[in-house]
Image (cartoon, rainbow, N blue to C red):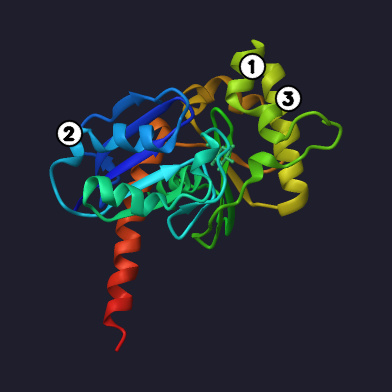
Amino acid sequence: MRRIGIDVGGSTLRIAEVDVASGECAGPVESLPMPRGAKPEAVLAALAANPLLRSGTGPIGLGIPSVVEHGVARTAAHLDAAWIGLDVATAFTRLTLRPTVVINDADAAGLAEMRFGAGRVPALRVPARRIIVLTFGTGIGSALFVDGRLWPNTEFGHLRLPGVDDVDGEGWAAASVRTRLGLDWPTWVARVDDYLQELQRLLWPEAFIVGGAVSAQAAEWVPLLKCAVPVLPAVLRGQAGVVGAALAAVDAAAAEDNEARIP
Ligand code: BGC
């Protein structure tokens, strides 16, 4: 079965048709620039106009960098504030005439990594029950898994770190901070270590999976980490968001099917 997965990132919108059984994209991942201002009408209209959405009728999965409850965006960290309170699922369904499942972008990436990437058994070298997937990009996204099940909408990117007063965790250690400040790998990795150490102190995960675009260069920086917990580079890299969004569309559709069968 194929489903459309969409990943709304800080600067890029990605769309792909995904084979949800294999986790592979059926064609190239299409990238569109984030419309100026990142306002919901402009973003949703740009996505809805994509030819990939013209074929097929099944549910669409849409990952956005917001806390999402029942299709409604509750926060907007790298988006215009007009997203807050918007029923994104309904708005996109009106534009596309297709059911839409909306999910936090990092939760989507986490679902994909757990099913098809670094969190898959036996790719995972430790028999871990508690895993945190982190995406390092414009911000830091987080997805918390317990026995393979997601606790959605964790916002660990906004954790405050001891001794860092002016910014939150993502302001200290996101991949965008490395680029913006021109940090070399060791300097940035020391910041990522501060961040992982604080998460470890509070949550005691058995493994971290680190993703986002910067995971393409994992060989440069993951070995430099001093973190005591195993840190596994994400496998799906830039595709995790679209793959996970497509999975969410299927899972939500499956859940609805189940409900429909309850007498
Ligand atoms: C947002 C999260 C998002 C993450 C990665 C954070 O700033 O608060 O919702 O998952 O960035 O995009």
Q: CA distance from mark 3 to mark 2?
A: 43 Å
**Which dot, 1 or 2, sits closer to the camera?**
2
According to the picture, the residue beneath numbered tag 2 turns out to be 51
Q: Amino acid at mark 1?
A: Trp
According to the picture, the residue beneath numbered tag 1 turns out to be 185
Relative placement, left or right, of 180 versus 1 is: right
In depth, the one of 242 and 21 nearer the eye is: 242
Q: Position of residue 149 (x, y in %)?
A: 50, 61
Which numbered disc flags the more N-terminal residue, 3 or 2? 2
**Which dot, 3 or 2, sits closer to the camera?**
2
Q: Amino acid at mark 2?
A: Pro
Q: Is residue 215 above or below residue 69?
A: above
Q: CA distance from mark 1 to mark 2?
A: 39 Å
The secondary element bearing badge 3 is classed as: helix
The secondary element bearing badge 1 is classed as: helix
The secondary element bearing badge 2 is classed as: helix
Which numbered disc flags the more N-terminal residue, 1 or 2? 2
Give the crowd class for mark 3: few <14, some 14-19, many >=20 residues within 10 Å: some
